[in-house]
Image (spheres, rainbow, N blue to C red):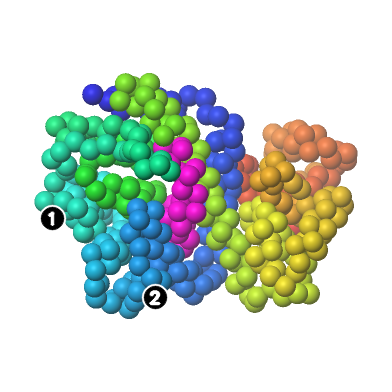
């Protein structure tokens, strides 16, 4: 019996995973303001993401149809004509169910069976977990099959799923970090492989459900399924790496957590990139790379900048990035191959002493100013990001500081 032990995510977290979590949290903290400002844009993006999620989650499993037929089924309620189209329509209905009322949908046996039944997958009419053992195999270029992973036997599936549901209740109610425990639950689900068919698609529906229940709903506006489809080799590689030793209770969640967080961050970056286009008006030829980065919450790659400025050549964008880096107006995030660029924001808040702040606050400001390298002991520029994020003094700062 697998032991559902999540102590790994309570210990030391790898630095790159911690960085991914911090970046996601940073973007999330600002994204709500823009959502309130552009409700129509978000509504339009929700429709686009819905179509993409249905298409790409099925495509990962080899269930395909033409774009026109998928659009007809998803957007116009067209009648499916073939079995693959019935599976596509089923995913549409399951996704709509999660979108409509995720808060009241429990992650339990009945929910998982209902979602699977809606998919029209093999055996879904039974409304039960698998009744025969299954295996995950790969086929090489010469047509030979290789065992990749041996899931839980059918005779043990019911017990393992019950343990998973109980583990989730504990994780979600005892203050565990959702960005860490949700991919753990999804990995466990895929290692159990509770159905003969439809495990991948139900896992992606469950992913959205659990994210939505934690208020993380970027996948409503940008399809995470599409990002997974486009990085399928990395997806399967991370699953293989994390599932190794799972049955013997000597495995690590971190490879899959790392991949999961990268895809989630890509969704946030994708959303932010789209707003560089829809924010007020489309960005044209006369606007610069600096304008794009200035308006972006998340760091952007050269490829993403080019997507926003389709009329500007790649050479011009690369040259502009190089100049902006040299002038210190943007900064580079990440290594060369996966580098992104972020605008260096100068705006801050000015505090002059004596002030209404207490002496304790004055000492705090003095220490903070020394940390920031501000020379004058009487006048301090406090960066706006410090007030926006995580400071226990935020309320006092906002009350006592005026914008410079």
Of badges 1 and 2, nearer the viewer stands 2
- Local packing at callout 2 (Cα closer than 10 Å; few below 14, some 14-19, many 20+) is few
Q: Position of residue 293 (x, y in %)?
A: 71, 59
User: Residue 125 — which label?
Assistant: 1
Residue drawn at point x = 52 percent, y = 59 percent: 32
Q: Is residue 148 above or below residue 245?
A: below
Q: Is residue 215 left or right of residue 357?
A: left
Is 216 part of what is drawn in magenta? yes
Camera-nearest residue between 385 and 324:
324
Residue 359 visible somewhere in the drawing: no
Residue drawn at point x = 63 percent, y = 50 percent: 388
User: Residue 144 — which label?
Assistant: none
Q: Is residue 73 left or right of residue 296?
A: left
- Local packing at callout 1 (Cα closer than 10 Å; few below 14, some 14-19, many 20+) is few
Residue found at the far front of this picture: 142
Q: Is residue 34 above or below residue 7?
A: below
Q: Quadrant of the C terminus?
A: bottom right
Residue 146 figure quarter: top left
Dot 1: what SS? helix
Q: Is residue 395 left or right of residue 373?
A: left
Please give the range of residues in magenta: 215-239
Q: Main secondary structure of the magenta part?
A: helix
Residue drawn at point x = 51 percent, y = 67 percent: 36
Q: Quadrant of the N terminus?
A: top left
Camera-nearest residue between 81 and 277:
81
Q: Position of residue 113 (x, y in %)?
A: 19, 49
Residue found at the far left of this picture: 126
Is 141 part of what is drawn in magenta? no
Residue 146 visible somewhere in the drawing: yes
For marks 1 and 2 on the same chain, the one whose residue lies earlier in the sequence: 2
The residue labelled by disc 2 is 68
């Amino acid at each position: 019996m697998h032991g559902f032990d999540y102590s790994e995510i309570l210990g030391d977290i790898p630095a790159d995973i911690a960085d991914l979590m911090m970046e996601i949290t940073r973007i999330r903290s600002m994204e709500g303001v823009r959502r309130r400002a552009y409700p129509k844009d978000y509504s339009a993006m929700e429709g686009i993401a819905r179509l993409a999620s249905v298409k790409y989650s099925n495509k990962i499993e080899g269930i395909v149809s033409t774009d026109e037929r998928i659009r007809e089924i998803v957007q116009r309620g067209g009648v499916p004509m073939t079995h693959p189209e019935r599976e596509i329509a089923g995913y549409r209905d399951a996704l709509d169910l999660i979108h409509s009322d995720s808060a009241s949908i429990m992650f339990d046996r009945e929910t998982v069976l209902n979602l699977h039944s809606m998919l029209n997958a093999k055996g879904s009419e039974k409304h039960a977990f698998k009744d025969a053992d299954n295996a995950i195999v790969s086929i090489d270029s010469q047509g030979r099959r290789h065992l990749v992973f041996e899931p839980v036997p059918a005779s043990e599936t019911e017990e393992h799923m019950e343990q998973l549901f109980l583990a989730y209740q504990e994780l979600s109610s005892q203050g565990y970090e959702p960005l860490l425990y949700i991919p753990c639950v999804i990995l466990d689900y895929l290692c159990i492989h509770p159905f003969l068919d439809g495990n991948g698609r139900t896992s992606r529906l469950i992913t959205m459900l659990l994210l939505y229940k934690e208020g993380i709903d970027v996948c409503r506006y940008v399809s995470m399924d599409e990002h997974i489809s486009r990085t399928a080799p990395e997806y399967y590689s991370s699953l293989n790496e994390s599932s190794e030793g799972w049955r013997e209770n000597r495995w690590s969640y971190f490879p899959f957590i790392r991949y999961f967080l990268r895809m989630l961050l890509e969704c946030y970056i994708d959303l932010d990139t789209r707003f560089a286009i829809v924010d007020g008006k489309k960005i044209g030829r006369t606007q610069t790379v600096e304008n794009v980065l200035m308006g972006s919450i998340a760091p952007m790659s050269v490829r993403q900048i080019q997507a926003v400025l389709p009329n500007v050549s790649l050479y011009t964008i690369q040259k502009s990035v190089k100049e902006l880096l040299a002038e210190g107006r943007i900064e580079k995030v990440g290594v060369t191959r996966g580098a992104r660029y972020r605008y260096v924001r100068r705006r801050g808040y000015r505090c002059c002493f004596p002030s209404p702040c207490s002496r304790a606050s004055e000492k705090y400001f003095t220490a903070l100013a020394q940390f920031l390298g501000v020379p004058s002991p009487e006048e301090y520029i406090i960066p706006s990001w410090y007030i926006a994020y995580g400071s226990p003094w935020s309320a006092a700062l906002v009350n006592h500081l005026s914008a410079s």
